[in-house]
Amino acid sequence: MPGRKNEVRRIQVTGYQIRKIILEQSFRAQVGHIGSALSIADIVAAIYSSVLTQRRPGEKDRHRFILSKGHAALALYAALYLKGWIQKKELDSFCSDGTRLGVHPEIGLRGVDFSTGSLGHGLAMGAGAALGARLGHSKRKVVVLMSDAECNEGSTWETAMFAAHHKLANLVGIVDLNGQQAFGYTKDVLNLQGMAARWKQFGWETHSVDGHDQKALTKILRSVKTNFGKPHLLVAKTTFGKGVSFMENQIKWHYWPINQIEYKQALKEIRD
Amino acid sequence: MLLTGDLGYTVLEPFAQQFPQRFYNVGVAEQNMVGVATGLAEAGYIPFVYSIATFASLRAYEFIRNGPMWQRLRVRIVGIGGGFEYGTLGLTHYALEDVGLFRLQPEMTVLVPVDGGQVATMLRKTWDKPGPIYYRLSKRDLPLIEELAGKFTLGKAEMLRRGKDILGITMGTMARQTLAMADRLAASGISVGVMAVASLAPAPLGQLKRELEKVGIAFTLEAHYKIGGLGTLVAEIVADNDLPCLLWRCGVEDHRGIHLGDEPYLLKQHQLTEARMIKKLVTMVKEGKKRW
C-alpha cells in the first residue's frame, strides 16, 4: 500500500525527524554542513507541512520552494524523503558516487525545482517564479530559504528591490538568522544587525519569528496574504547546530563531519 | 517576454508599447535580471534579457551558468554591441570575450549574426529552442549583405563566396570586411572563399572541416579576443582533424597601451585593417607556394 505508507510519512515531517536524518546521513557519508542543516530543520518542516502540501512533487500548479542556502540540502532531502517523494535507497545514496543527492540540491531530483549552491541566486529565481505565477493567474506561493550570510551578496538586495517594486506578495523569503557563516560569526564578518529593519526599508513585509517554533512558522506561512502587495520576509531566529549541544553556535560545525562517539551523543540529544 | 537592465532607450519602446504586460525594465541589476528570467523560464515563459554585451554576459555570467545553462531553461541573453562597437565609450563597453565565455558552457547556444536579415531568420528559427541562447547583436544599422540573403541554419555556416586559394572564416559584422578583402585579392589573382559562422555553438564542425581540407591557407577574422572565439574554434578543428592548412587567426590580442577612438580607429590599432591583412595574406600565398 504505497499510498498509505506515503500518508504515514507525510505527517512526520517534523524538525526531529529531519534532524535525525541529517545526522544519520552526514555520519554515514562523512560530510559536513551539519550545523547549517540542523538550524533550518524546523523551518523546512514548517514549509513542507504548511505550503508544500501537494501529494506529488510534479503537480502542475505546485507551490515552489527554493533552498537558496543549498549547502543545507540534507534538511531538504530529509523532507523529500518524509513526504514520500524520494525512497530510502535514494536517500542512502547521499554523497556516494552516482548519486543525485549531492551536498547542494540539483534539479532532476524529484521535488527540486531549482538547483542551488552558489549563494545569492535563489531569491532572484524565486522572484521570477513568483512573477511567472502572477502572470499565469496562479495562486501559488514561492518560498525561498536563505542564510543570513547570504545577505552579504549584492544580488540578494537587487532582488529585494525588484520584488518590492513589483509587489510580489506571493514571494515569501525566509532568512535563517543563525548568526554564523563559514569563517566566523556574522557580527564579526559583516554585521547584519537589524535584519528585519533592512528588509522593511526595502519595502518588504517582515515577520520576526522563532525559527525553531514549527507552529509559529506554520501559522505565518499559512496566513501571509499573497495578493498584489509587499513581498514577505520571515526573519527566523535560529541556533546553528540546533539540538546538539556541542555543535550549537560552533564555527567548526559548518564544515566538520562527525565521528562515531559524537554521532551517538548527537542522536541521543536530539531525541531527548 | 522582454526584460532589460535599463538599456535600449529608443530601441525597445515599440515592444514595450505593444506588449506592456510582457515588458519589464528591471533596473540596473543584471544578476537579478537573469535570476528572474530563470524563474520565469521554469514557469514556462521564454524571457529575452537585454543589455550591452559586456553587462549581459560578464556581469550575470554565473547566474547564466547556474541558472538557464545547468538547468536547461529557455532564457535568451541578448548582448548588444560586440567588439569595439561602443568606440569612445571605452574599455568597460568592449565585448571582446563574450563569445569565448559562452562557448565554454556546454548547453549554451551561441549566435553571432552577420546582418539584420540574418537576425530575423535566426530569431524565427531559434526563439523557442530548448536551453539558453546568447545572441550577440550589432548596434549598427548596416546595409544587408546580398550574398547572405538573410539565410541562417543552426549548426551551419554560410558560404558567402567560393574560392580556391584561401578560405576566410568570419563572424558578425566583420563579414563585410572579409568580403571586401576577397574582392581586392581577387583583383590580384588570389581566389578567396568567405564563410560566415553565425552559429558558434552548436558549431558547424563537419562543414568547417570539409572546407578547410580544400585549401592551403585559411584565416579567421573576428571582433573578439584571438583567444576563445571563432579563431580558437577553427584552430580546434584544424588540430582535432590533423588538417594540413596554414591558419592565421586575426582578432584582438591585448588592449593595453591603446587609446580610445571609434570602431575603425580601434580595429586599425589592433592591426585588423583590410590593407594590413591583405599584405600578409599575399605573403602567405607566396610562401605557401614555396612550402607545398
Image (cartoon, coloured by chain):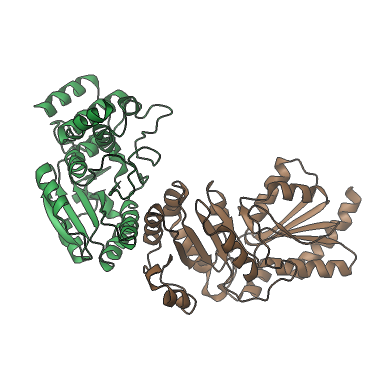
Q: At which x and y percent is residue B147? A: 75, 68
Q: Residue at x 66, y 69 (%)?
A: B267
Of B213 and A250, the residue lying toward us:
B213
Q: At which x and y percent is residue B283? A: 84, 60
Residue found at the far bottom of this picture: B10
Q: Quadrant of residue A25?
A: top left
Q: Residue at x 26, y 54 (%)?
A: A140
Q: At which x and y percent is residue A43? A: 18, 43
Of A243 and A253, the residue lying toward us:
A243
Q: At which x and y percent is residue A72? A: 27, 39
Q: Residue at x 43, y 47 (%)?
A: B71
Of B247 and B139, the residue lying toward us:
B139
Classify B252 as above or below B16.
Answer: above
Classify B49 as above or below A141.
Answer: below
Q: Is residue B272 visible?
A: no
Q: Specify whether A34 is left or right of A219.
A: right
Q: What color was chain B assigned in the picture?
A: brown
Q: What color was chain A assigned in the picture?
A: green
Q: Quadrant of residue B157?
A: bottom right
Classify A33 as above or below A193.
Answer: above
Quadrant where the N terminus of chain B sits is bottom left
